[in-house]
Amino acid sequence: MEVRSALFASVLALFAILAGPSAAEDTGASGGGAIVNPGRSCEGRPTSTRLIVQVGRLRSNEGEVAVTVYPSDPKRFLAPRGKLLRVRVKADAPMTQACFYLPRPDAYAVTVYHDANANRDFDRNAVGLPVEGFAFSNDAPSKVGVPTFQDARFMAKPGDTVLRVRMRYGR
């Protein structure tokens, strides 16, 4: 599984280089905001700090969306066993939502991928480019290599923080 995470990060970097910038709109962290599906439970131990991740621009309702939260330690970002929390939710195009209880207000980063065939793997074509959509918090750019933690980081505040990300798909 650790090799798969490292490979996932490498492939995302390559794809980001080839795909260029996405048409990002309405991305980033924002305070407040209504929860689209209040019936969905949150991942993690209940605290007073919640993160609601709204994943937009999904191409289909197929499969599931994997949302991973990384803590404020930049060395853990995209590293094997570096995640803080992960949840897989049924894809609900055009926007899917995931909810997390965070340990405290702090800096975090999020990665997302649309596992359209629900095989719990980030699928690639014969050349190694992703065939499934992906996203980073702040629509983090990556000219060469994977985005840095600094590019993907956002601040979670006490109470609810709503983070909106947009899926990127191959051309």
Image (tube, rainbow, N blue to C red):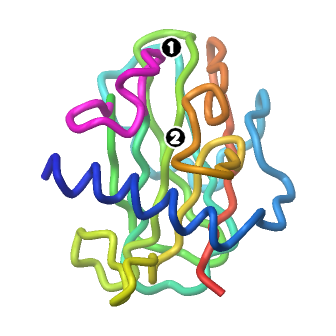
Name the residue that disc number 1 marks.
48
Q: How many marks?
A: 2
Q: Position of residue 136 (x, y in %)?
A: 59, 49
45 or 165: nearer the viewer: 165
* Vertical comparison of 106 with 67: above or below: above
Q: Does the magenta-highlighted stretch encompass residue 74? A: yes
Question: Mark 2 packing: few (<14 Cα in 10 Å), some, or many (20+)?
Answer: many
Residue 88 position by quadrant: bottom left
Residue 96 position by quadrant: bottom right
Left/right placement of residue 92 relative to residue 126 reads: right
79 or 107: nearer the viewer: 79
Residue 19 position by quadrant: bottom right
Name the residue that disc number 2 marks.
110
Q: Residue at x 66, y 15 (%)?
A: 157
Q: Position of residue 126 (x, y in %)?
A: 33, 90
Q: Residue at x 78, y 27 (%)?
A: 31
